[in-house]
Image: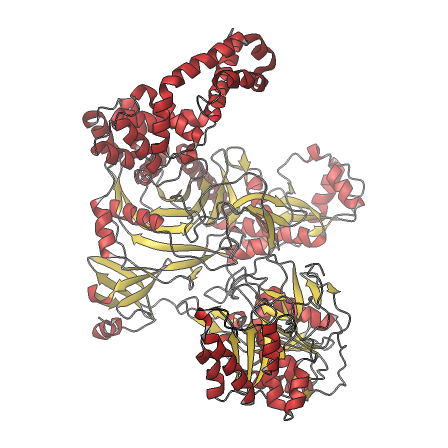
Amino acid sequence: MDYKKVMKKFGVNEGEFVEIHSEGYVYEGYILPSSKKEFFTLKLKSGYNIGIAAEKVERINKLKEEAAIEKKVFKEIEKKENLPRITILHTGGTIASKVDYRTGAVVCSFLPEDLINMFPEISEIANLDSRLIANMWSDDLRFKHISMIAKAIKEEVEKGVDGIIIGIGTDNLAPAAAGLAFALENLPIAVILVGAQRSSDRGSSDAAVNIISAANFIIKSDFSGVAICMHGSTSDDFCYILPSCKTKKMHSSARDAFKPINDTPIAKVEYPSGKIEFYKKDYIKKDKNRKLILKENFEEKVGLLKITPNMFPEQFSFYRKNKFKGLVIEGTGLGHTPAHVPNQYAKIHKKIYEEIKKLTKSGCIVIMTTTCLQGRVNMNVYNKGRDLQEAGIISGEDMLAEVAFMKLSWLLGNFEDRDKIKEMISKNLRGEIRERTLLNVEKW
Amino acid sequence: MEENIEITAGLEIHQQIGSKKLFCRCKAQLKEDNPDAIIRRRIRLAASELGEFDKAALEVFKKKYYFVYQYFKDVCCLVELDEEPPHSCDIEALKTALEVSLLINAKIPDILYVMRKTVIDGSNVSGFQRTMLVSIGGNLKLKNGKEVQIQSLALEEDAARLIAKDETKKEIIYNLDRLGIPLIELSTTPCLKTPTEVKEAALAIGELLRITCKARRGLGTIRQDLNISIKGGARVEIKGVQELELIDEYVRKEVLRQKNLIEIKKILEQRKLSKEELDEEPLNINELMKECKCNFIKEAVQNKKFVYAKKFAKMRDIFGKEIQPNRRFGTEIVSYLKAKTNIKGFIHSDEDLKKYKFEDDEIRKIKEKLRINEEDAFVIIVGNEEDCLDALRVITERCKQAIEGVPEETRNALEDGNSEYSRPLPGAARMYPETDIPPILIDKELLEEIKRNLPKTADERFEIYTKKYGLSEKLANEMKLNNYARFFEEMVEDGVEAKTLAVFLLEWITQLKRENLDVDKIDEIFIKDVIDVYMKGIVTRDNLLDFIRYCLISNEPVKEAAIKFKKDTISIKEVENKIEEIVKTNRELIKDKKEYAFSALMGDVMKELKGKIQAKILSEILRRKIAEEIELIEKS
């Protein structure tokens, strides 16, 4: 039985304070919206929620409502004249999420007043502006969103702000950072992407340390460009400023999930002191007179295919048949796919290789990256690699697959000349390719 | 006399249960060695349901501590570190909570919701404690026939263990081993009327939880909080009473405290003290104290710290009034300062100021400056300016409360039955749903199954154990509240000899533990296997303890150990005799080298017995024989 029908029967509504009679027992509490329709969800005075089967409800009486809970009104923030200006652009995600303590629903909060309320330290270092440009989890990210964020950044840059923080869900934070890095050429100021692995409603949230560290980095350093600011360790001691095109989320839940791959962090920002230590010296310095060039187009029809054992030709022909303009392959090892027929079980691989050739011939640009994450693609070492090169596959060097994917869509979206696009794939544009592969010493 | 005072008291018992943590699969075990990692975190204030900050939390938070967590990989995972969402609820713990609910005839809702209870003292890494209401209502009969009404039963996570507080580094250190161990929180209604009744209720609830055989044992596994008020007083929560036996003492001393606070209120009423009269401005008296011989004042003046004094009109003899044995109103105020400010103490005019080496003239000058009259008191605070003023505000606030009587608050139990202020009473709006765990639908069949297998009461057990099973009263008394009781019953009903099993469970395990053998290996399967071997006659009663020892040492599955043991048993006696012979002939050596004679003698033993029996067992017997010999030598 639907609890809503039972509510109707007894003339009560969600949010009302009631007593529910069920199986000889009387529960007192507020009716909350219920996710299971056969059950009432009741918030008891003790604060606990319980569920009561709708079919067992014998009677509901509306009780005198408790005094309405008064929302605290936050005082308007005073802008301090001599402080730099930072704009926070919100796109949703855990970083902006709060729990409605009554219903348990996750809601987003974007008012600068709310942010100052949550992270009061920021008001000491900057005047904050806040804009909501989307309200979504980053899993739903599409190229159009990145274009939209890039345009919003341009507007803010033109207003003369000193830096921009972008709050975004962590799942696609790294690809978004790469996308923005490509879309924003000649960026005069720092644009820092920040996420949270723990939502702001809990005391232990990493959101504050990440946002405050990002603000500190924007104000106290001369860095310009797109970067990521996230926890450097599981402790609340420091954040890393990570390169936009060399970073991957390497843990599904931990605070220090974001790691530079085939690269070092740009800098470290200590918390709470805000002290900055740079690991990279070759970044482009902030210059508010520099003119931002926006190249915000992305080709929609680009794919990413991960190589696994036991693949089928259909997994490759899919891209040709559906007229994809670009494909990034995340190949095994140095950059390989199944393509040879060593014995009877692998006969099908001949067709795979043919499909790859057909794909490139159809005009689709194909880039090879590696599932290993660490290290560089080199298709010269084994025959297989050479065959793939012959089929027209271009080496993605030491690029992360997702970054190569963003880069390829961006190249296809903004440039016409195919030869030029192919040339640019293997050329470093935004720090996505490093010529030298260094020993991974984890000590920067 | 005390039984005549009208009191209203309720209990909140927290009992650890089960062997696994509630929301991850780590084992419930405390660690004392060096942590595998240290993690430092901050907790930030979360806006509470009211959009305001929780007062209780705010007081601690104001101090801006870093929380330092000791992580042990054996007993903690990413869930404790708040680096991973919780796993599903431990079904054994939930079953136990449901079982207790059924035992007290409480009402179990159709769906349980796991909630987050905001905790920002750092004891929960996440900033909240996960808790779920398992049942409402119910009752429990005391021995004298009185019915104790139960308010609710919740299943929740235990908090991390406080290790140290470093004021200079502003660090609070916690051990994460305890975090997440399941706790049953059972609260009575405020239906208890005398200290003795409170104690009896506490004992009865303790017993109720123990008959489930899932209650954890040992120091700190059960904690009780006390809610208490007297007529004209106020509701006070005393937290962390560890000794069940002392609980009536806490009630008595709290009654005394509230009575004395009411008396203070009456005195202040007679003196017609108004709150406004306490708003006197604090005065800086550094100038007056330049020549002061009092050590800490001298030091403060030299170090450019501040000495502040403030008049407390009509408060003479109040600061010095004893409100609990050896606890004055002044001492009480110090606990407020500790909880709320950076100041740890103060001087007041009810004290013998000469003991601080104040000169008469200085006292006179202070009094003059503050315009102290006959009925007035004054307070002196030393520290930096902000802290001094902060402390004086807190003292003033507390004195204003004294005009009204007893303030509602949470207090910490002290060892002697007294208590001290810890924080305001927690507000009600501290809970919101744990969105990471789906609501738990209570399965009817599961409930029926638990209902069919409810544990027997301790008294019922005693009856059965003595009359039906033929245990001695001593063994029956020990067994009835032992965590093996239900297993014991099950085995005996299956035909196992009660006495042998009881001795195994109650005496032998302890003995083997004393011999430093790894008794953690003894679980129900082990016991069943051993008993099986015994019941089949493979091992005799006389040999049974030796056989268990043999199993533990040889580390082989019981059934395989039995075959070897059987082969060895004839020789084991021989072996024991042989080793004893070697030990006796080397008495002098043992006398000289004590335990260190072992390696020398092991050579002899191996020469004689090598290949006849496992070396491990030989060394174990030798070790035991040497120990026995040392004991003999020491006795003589």
Image coordinates of residue A79 in percent, x first then y, are 67, 77
Outermost residue to the bottom: A416
Which image quadrant for residue A222?
A: bottom right
Total number of numbered discs in the rendering: 0
Give residue B375's position: percent from left, percent from top: 60, 43
- B268 relative position to B185: left or right: right
Q: In this rendered view, identify the residue nearer to me: A369 or A351.
A: A351
Q: Is residue B444 above or below residue B2?
A: below
Left or right of residue A187, residue B279 in this image? left
> Outermost residue, top direction?
B636
> Residue A388: horizontal and vertical position, in percent?
58, 78
Is residue B32 or residue A59 the one in the foreground?
A: B32
Q: Residue at x 21, y 27 (%)?
A: B469
Q: Identify which residue, B196 or B229, lies in the foreground.
A: B196
Q: Along the horizontal axis of the image, is B263 left or right of A123?
A: left
Which quarter shows the C terminus of chain A?
Answer: bottom right
The residue positioned farthest toward the front in the image shown: A343
Residue B110 in view: yes
In which quarter of the view is residue B112 placed? bottom left
Residue B545 seen in the current view? no
Residue B395 position, x and y percent, is 59, 49
Left or right, residue A243 beside residue B119: right
Comparing A401 with A251, the one in front is A401
